[in-house]
Amino acid sequence: MDLVMPGLDGLAATKAIKQRYPGVEVVALTSFSEAERVHLALAAGAAGYLLKDADADEVSAAVRAAVRGEVHLDSAVARTLTQSLAAPRRAAAALTPREREILVLVAQGKSNRDIAGALVISERTARTHVSSVLAKLGLASRTQAALWAIREGLVPGP
């Protein structure tokens, strides 16, 4: 299953296939190796995740693994996933107490203005702290930061 397709994307197609035909196994084939995309594909029901430069033997191995009920990941993807699992723990330790406080407020849906008011700092300082938190955690958005904070137990989930 190619994950990037016009119309119905590969994630939605994989999910639909698995819901309608649970016995059918799907192996994702894509050019993206980011951990978040891998997680999404596996959560949608993919039994494997390969990069488009995979050779025929690897494609065959992934299909065979899927038939056996196993998950097959491209070695570069597996390495990325392993690093992504270890990195947040190290990154969390690198956050200052103020950055943790900022992260909790971000996870609560607070804007930079709200954060500034709550902590009696300037909005610019709040924005700088938010940027620092995102950089240290290797995240791209406030939403990712909020999800990370929930997953790590810094704030209760919805």
Image (tube, helix red, strand yellow):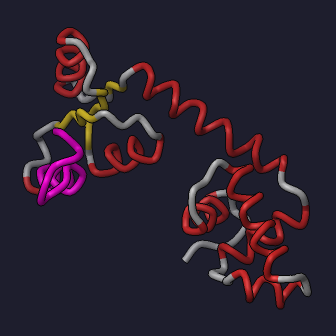
Q: Which residues are magenta?
A: 1-19
Name the residue: 27% across, 35% down: 30
Task: Answer above or below: position of 104 versus 112.
Answer: above
- In the rendered structure, the answer to whether residue 30 lies left or right of residue 117 reads left
Q: To which quarter of the image does residue 111 belong?
A: bottom right
* Lateral position of residue 113 relative to residue 98, left or right: left
Q: Which image quarter holds the C terminus?
A: bottom right
Quarter of the image that includes the N terminus: top left
Q: Residue 106 or 64: which is nearer the viewer?
A: 106
Residue 8 position in % (x across, y down): 14, 58
Q: Position of residue 129 (x, y in %)?
A: 80, 66
Q: Is residue 8 magenta?
A: yes
Which residue lies most toward the left here?
A: 21
Q: Nearer the viewer, residue 99 or 126?
A: 126
The front one of 98 and 67 is 98
Residue located at (58% from left, 38% from top):
84
Across the whole image, how many numbered discs are drawn on residues?
0
Query: Furthest-front residue in view?
Result: 124
Q: Quadrant of residue 127?
A: bottom right
Percent position of residue 52, x then y: 25, 26
Q: Quadrant of residue 61?
A: top left
Q: Residue at x 66, y 36 (%)?
A: 86
Q: Residue at x 72, y 62 (%)?
A: 131
Horizontal side of 29 relative to 94 (left or right) equals left
- The single residue placed furthest to the top in the displayed view is 57
Residue 139 higher or lower than 81, as above or below:
below
Q: Determine whether, in the image, residue 132 is placed left or right of residue 58.
A: right
In this view, 55 is above or below 140 = above
Residue 64, how many percent across, how many down?
Answer: 18, 18
